[in-house]
């Protein structure tokens, strides 16, 4: 669309307005509208009482931007408005709707608000499903602001509905507005960049009862668990990729990701999930010319209540974060997959549902977690860990407070080549082990207080890169620390371990372990126990300078089975002291008996 055509049509509109010619049926065009700066929907016949349909009036006002070279402001005065048809917003438009309540009364599927742009051949195009628009990347609608208004989709449960959708867009601002009452995503900004959303409210996903296959996919609706997880994937603010895995066959599919999105001071209430996408990008540059990971989704200072899924879905997002948010009755805080994100300044008490760990980091991702409080007491049967790293991921958790993880689940864990670091934290009343590692490439726990675990305080199996230092561990139902089949020179040093129901520290078939400068007391079975079940599964350990207070009938340090090249030196031991029933000779010296 050339500037000449836009200017010419704008002049034509001005002439029509000034000569009293009627535009769009019975809706007049004002002289101020022709100037392309400020228009008021009431001047176009909008009914502020909500009794009459204002769709045509709204659209006529919005269409001023269709051919305007200058930005256009469309004002919706305070009042109640009824829309029987969806409306489309053009580029370079600011909608100011302070105090306005706009309620959709139509019965069709789809959006209440569409983005609108000119295609490369000059024809208008919404970019929606089955349209033939050829503009991709971020070259559809742009420079749009919606300031204020309650936008009520008012959807029937059988309608597959959204409130607002802008696709392939850029420079979009939503502020001081409410978006509510749809069965699908409330706001869809997939394949868009440079988005600012501030002081908005997103509420009320309506439970869908229709049979649309594109909504449900392969979910068996008689499977209540599958249905619950499907609803949990409905991000209130949807920020997907435009490819076959993200938004398949709906829009121009060229792989465009989202980037640079800022969401702050918003409220999310009674919705499936907060913001982001649960899909991962497809690395196929031959098929998708704009292929790439999404980036820069920053969520801060928001309120989440009654969230069925994650507050943030950072799938294939890099450099993203959620911080300083409050939450109640949310199933989870964040999922980080195939990307990187930070989570900080969040307190969640009482999880609601079962969609996975409260913070789940997987598929070769990186997450930094700090100043997070999670009370995992479930409201509706959640059965997952509080923080979990899987499949080659790396998690650093500092100053976190975790309590009441689900029965049979660790509070924080790492598996399948993942790494986890826990610093300066507190973990209590774990439903299983407090800190867990299996086939991990790193388990580091320092300066952390662990109490009343329903299993071991720390349990690591078949892993390497283990450093357990300066922790306080008390009242574990089994062992304070238990390593099995671990390698890579594990170090257990400077810990205080007391009142475990089994042993303070227990090793099975672990190699080149150093246990030094620990203080152990009141552990029911033995203070330090080392076991090698066979010649192939032997243990190697250096036990140095520990103080182990033990009951009179219990051993402070006990080595059994195949303990190869083991050393027990300069320890202070109580109870029955030190003993070794090893198939190999143990080097022992300088150990002193204490009361």
Image (cartoon, rainbow, N blue to C red):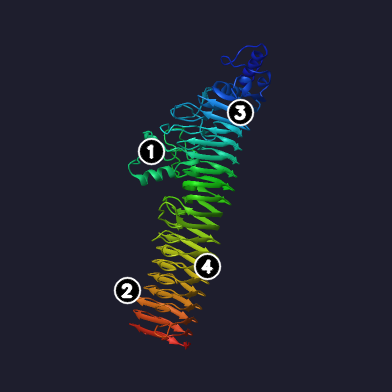
What is the crowding at mark 3: few (fewer than 14 residues within 10 Å), some, or many (at least 20)?
Answer: some
Q: Is residue 248 visible?
A: yes
Q: Find disc 1 in the rendering and name its residue.
A: 216
Q: Is residue 364 visible?
A: no
Looking at the image, residue 21 lies above or below residue 174? above
Q: SS of the residue at dot 1?
A: helix
Residue 448 - label: 4
Q: Are marks 4 and 2 in contact (CB under 8 Å)?
A: no
Q: Find disc 2 in the rendering and name its residue.
A: 536
Distance between the Cα atoms at labels 4 and 3? 56 Å
- Measured from the top left, where is residue 330 in percent x and y? 48, 49
Total marks shown come to: 4
Q: Are marks 4 and 3 in contact (CB under 8 Å)?
A: no
What is the crowding at mark 2: few (fewer than 14 residues within 10 Å), some, or many (at least 20)?
Answer: few
- Measured from the top left, where is residue 483 in percent x and y? 41, 70
- Measured from the top left, where is residue 562 in percent x and y? 34, 79
Q: Quadrant of residue 145?
A: top right
- Measured from the top left, where is residue 97 in percent x and y? 62, 31
| Horizontal relation, residue 278 to residue 62: left or right | left
């Amino acid at each position: 669309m050339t500037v000449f055509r836009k200017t010419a049509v704008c002049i034509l509109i001005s002439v029509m307005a000034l000569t009293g010619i009627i535009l769009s049926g019975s809706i007049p065009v004002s002289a101020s509208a022709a100037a392309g700066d400020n228009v008021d929907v009431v001047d176009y016949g909008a009914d502020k009482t909500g009794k009459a349909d204002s769709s045509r009036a709204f659209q006529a006002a919005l269409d001023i931007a269709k051919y305007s070279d200058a930005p256009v402001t469309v004002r919706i005065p305070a009042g109640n408005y009824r829309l029987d048809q969806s409306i489309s917003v053009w580029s370079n438009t600011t909608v100011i709707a302070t105090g306005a309540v706009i309620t959709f009364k139509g019965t069709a599927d789809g959006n209440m608000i569409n983005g609108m742009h000119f295609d490369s051949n000059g024809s208008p195009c919404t970019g929606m499903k089955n349209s033939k628009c050829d503009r991709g990347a971020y070259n559809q609608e742009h420079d749009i602001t919606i300031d204020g208004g309650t936008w009520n989709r008012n959807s029937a449960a059988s309608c597959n509905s959204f409130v607002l959708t802008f696709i392939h867009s850029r420079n979009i601002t939503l502020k001081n507005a409410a978006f509510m009452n749809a069965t699908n995503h409330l706001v869809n900004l997939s394949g868009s960049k440079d988005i600012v959303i501030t002081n908005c409210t997103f509420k009320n996903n309506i439970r869908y009862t229709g049979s649309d296959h594109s909504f449900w996919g392969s979910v068996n609706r008689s499977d209540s668990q599958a249905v619950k997880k499907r609803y949990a994937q409905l991000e209130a603010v949807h920020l997907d990729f435009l490819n076959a895995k993200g938004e398949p066959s709906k829009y121009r599919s060229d792989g465009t990701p989202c980037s640079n999105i800022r969401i702050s001071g918003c409220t999310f209430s009674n919705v499936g999930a907060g913001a982001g996408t649960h899909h991962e990008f497809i690395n196929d540059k031959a098929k998708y010319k704009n292929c790439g990971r999404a980036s820069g989704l920053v969520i801060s200072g928001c309120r989440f209540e009654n969230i069925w899924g994650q507050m943030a879905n950072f799938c294939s997002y890099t450099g993203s974060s959620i911080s300083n948010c409050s939450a109640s009755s949310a199933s989870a805080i964040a999922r980080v997959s195939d990307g990187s994100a930070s989570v900080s300044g969040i307190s969640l008490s009482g999880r609601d549902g079962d969609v996975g760990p409260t913070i789940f980091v997987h598929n070769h991702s990186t997450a930094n977690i700090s100043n997070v409080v999670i009370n995992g007491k479930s409201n509706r049967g959640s059965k997952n860990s509080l923080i979990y790293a899987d499949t080659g991921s790396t998690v650093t958790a500092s100053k976190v407070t975790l309590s009441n993880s689900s029965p049979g689940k660790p509070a924080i864990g790492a598996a399948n080549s993942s790494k986890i670091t826990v610093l300066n934290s507190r973990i209590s009343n774990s439903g299983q082990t407090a800190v867990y590692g299996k086939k991990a490439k790193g388990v580091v726990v320092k300066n952390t207080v662990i109490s009343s675990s329903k299993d071991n305080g720390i349990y690591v199996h078949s892993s390497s890169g283990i450093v357990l230092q300066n922790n306080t561990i008390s009242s574990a139902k089994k062992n304070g620390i238990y390593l099995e089949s671990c390698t890579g020179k594990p170090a257990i040093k400077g810990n205080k371990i007391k009142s475990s129901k089994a042993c303070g520290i227990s090793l099975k078939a672990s190699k080149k372990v150093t246990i030094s400068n620990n203080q152990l007391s009141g552990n029911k079975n033995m203070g330090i126990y080392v076991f090698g079940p066979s010649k192939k599964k032997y243990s190697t350990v250096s036990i140095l300078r520990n103080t182990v207070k033990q009951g009179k009938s219990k051993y402070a340090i006990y080595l059994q089975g195949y303990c190869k090249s083991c050393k027990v030196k300069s320890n202070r031991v109580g109870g029955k002291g030190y003993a070794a029933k090893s198939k190999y000779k143990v080097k022992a010296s300088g150990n002193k008996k204490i009361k």
